[in-house]
């Protein structure tokens, strides 16, 4: 399901990259940077640190859940403003997943895990703002005004978690592009949080 939802939002080339990275196997070797293992050697001249790699992996997973949540709104939301906002979130975050997947390849790091059909990724439940499997099931089973309220409440918490993660990247990362994306995430999602609170 996650791949079906990503397919709708990603350009063909970016989708191919995302799915190809998700299909990669592990068993890599050290890159010379402390921390996670790699699948290949980093590209020559690649500038990154462990904070950058963690940000790309974790924010990819975080975004995947947001894409799943947003895709549900197309059929289940009652308020057209909720549908519009969800479509905006999906359209913004799906390409960012592809961007971060490309960074992980460039840095010789493991690909980010792929969320299951409910937007769940084992081992990443403790990330700020991540919804539990029970939360995701409840959202998927709701419709109409109940869906709208649940979606907005959950997505506000989800966005607040993403802002926290992005701020950590801004403070600790070394890669200029990753820091720029983190800055964009903070600005975009803080604006969307304000919009969602107004809708509630």
Image: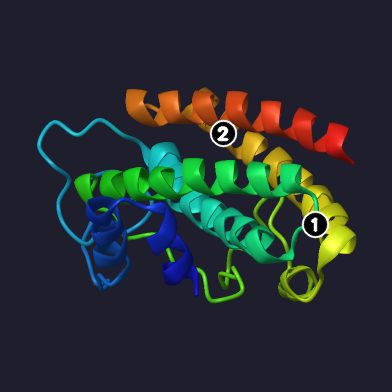
SS assignment at label 1: loop
**Is residue 5 shown above or below 108?**
below
Q: Name the residue under label 2.
A: 166
Residue appearing at x 52%, y 58% in the figure? 64
Residue 103: percent from left, percent from top: 29, 43
Above/below status of 179 relative to 90: above
Residue 93: where, in percent of width, then height?
Answer: 49, 45
* Left or right relative to 178: residue 172: right
| Mark 2 and mark 1: Cα distance apart in space | 31 Å
Q: Which residue lies under the disc numbered 1?
A: 78
The picture places residue 1, in percent across and down from the top left corner, at 50, 75
Lateral position of residue 109 relative to residue 189, left or right = left
The numbered mark, 2 or 1, whose residue comes first in the sequence reads 1
Q: Is residue 59 left or right of residue 73?
A: left
Q: Quadrant of residue 134?
A: bottom right
- Residue depicted at x 25% and y 74%: 25
Q: Position of residue 39 (x, y in %)?
A: 22, 62
- In depth, the one of 189 and 182 nearer the eye is 189
Disc nearest the viewer among 2 and 1: 1
SS at mark 2 in the image: helix
């Amino acid at each position: 399901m996650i791949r079906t939802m990503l397919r709708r939002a990603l350009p063909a080339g970016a989708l191919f990259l995302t799915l190809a990275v998700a299909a990669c196997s592990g068993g890599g070797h050290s890159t010379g940077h402390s921390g996670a293992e790699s699948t290949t050697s980093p590209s020559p001249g690649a500038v990154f640190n462990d904070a950058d790699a963690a940000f790309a992996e974790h924010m990819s997973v975080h975004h995947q859940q947001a894409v799943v949540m947003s895709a549900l709104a197309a059929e289940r939301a009652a308020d057209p403003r909720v549908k519009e906002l969800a479509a905006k979130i999906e359209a913004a975050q799906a390409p960012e997943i592809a961007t971060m997947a490309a960074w992980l390849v460039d840095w010789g790091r493991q690909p980010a895990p792929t969320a299951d059909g409910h937007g769940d990724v084992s081992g990443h439940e403790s990330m700020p703002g991540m919804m539990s499997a029970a939360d995701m099931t409840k959202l998927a089973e709701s419709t109409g005004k109940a869906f709208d309220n649940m979606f907005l409440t959950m997505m506000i918490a989800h966005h607040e978690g993403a802002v926290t993660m992005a701020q950590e990247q801004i403070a600790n990362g070394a890669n200029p592009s990753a820091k720029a994306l983190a800055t964009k995430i903070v600005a975009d999602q803080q604006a969307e949080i304000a919009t969602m609170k107004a809708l509630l």
